[in-house]
Amino acid sequence: MVHAHFTWDRRSLQPHVGDSQLPNIKSSKKDMRRSRIAAARNKAQRSALRLSVKRAKATAATADEKAEAITMLDRSARKGLIHRNTAARQKSRMMKAKKAA
């Protein structure tokens, strides 16, 4: 009898619970390591981007902070961290706020 909280992995027919089962194939193990490293790197870069944009949107933001935020938005879009339209939209809103102030 199969318990309700188990799901079955079709390839190996082994019960799979969350992330507790590790792959047996060498290339799959490497893929998992690489994806975890990339996820950690993306998380750090996304956090730095958000902080930079937040500082640039502050009322007392300097021109250097705004320039840094625009550079980080462009770099993040180029690397695929965020969508290019998202970067363009955020840059547009920053420029619009700059003109209004």
Image (spheres, rainbow, N blue to C red):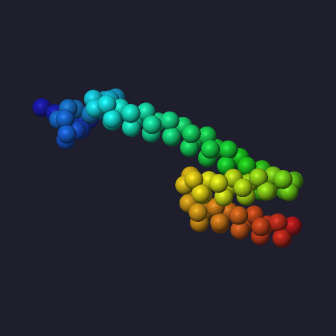
Q: x and y percent of residue 27 in the render?
A: 33, 35
Residue in view at x 65 percent, y 54 percent: 75
Q: x and y percent of residue 55 in the render?
A: 77, 50
Q: x and y percent of residue 53 in the render?
A: 72, 53
Q: Is residue 98 left or right of residue 88?
A: right
Q: x and y percent of residue 16 in the render?
A: 26, 33
The front one of 80 and 4 is 80
Q: Is residue 38 left or right of residue 75?
A: left
| Count of labels in the image | 0
The front one of 59 and 37 is 37
Considering every residue shown, the one lying at the far left of the view is: 1
Q: Is residue 54 visible?
A: no
Q: In the picture shown, does residue 89 fall above or below 50?
A: below
Residue in view at x 87 percent, y 54 percent: 62
Q: Is residue 13 left or right of residue 46?
A: left
Residue in view at x 75 percent, y 63 percent: 94
Q: Quadrant of the N terminus?
A: top left
Considering every residue shown, the one lying at the far front of the view is: 27
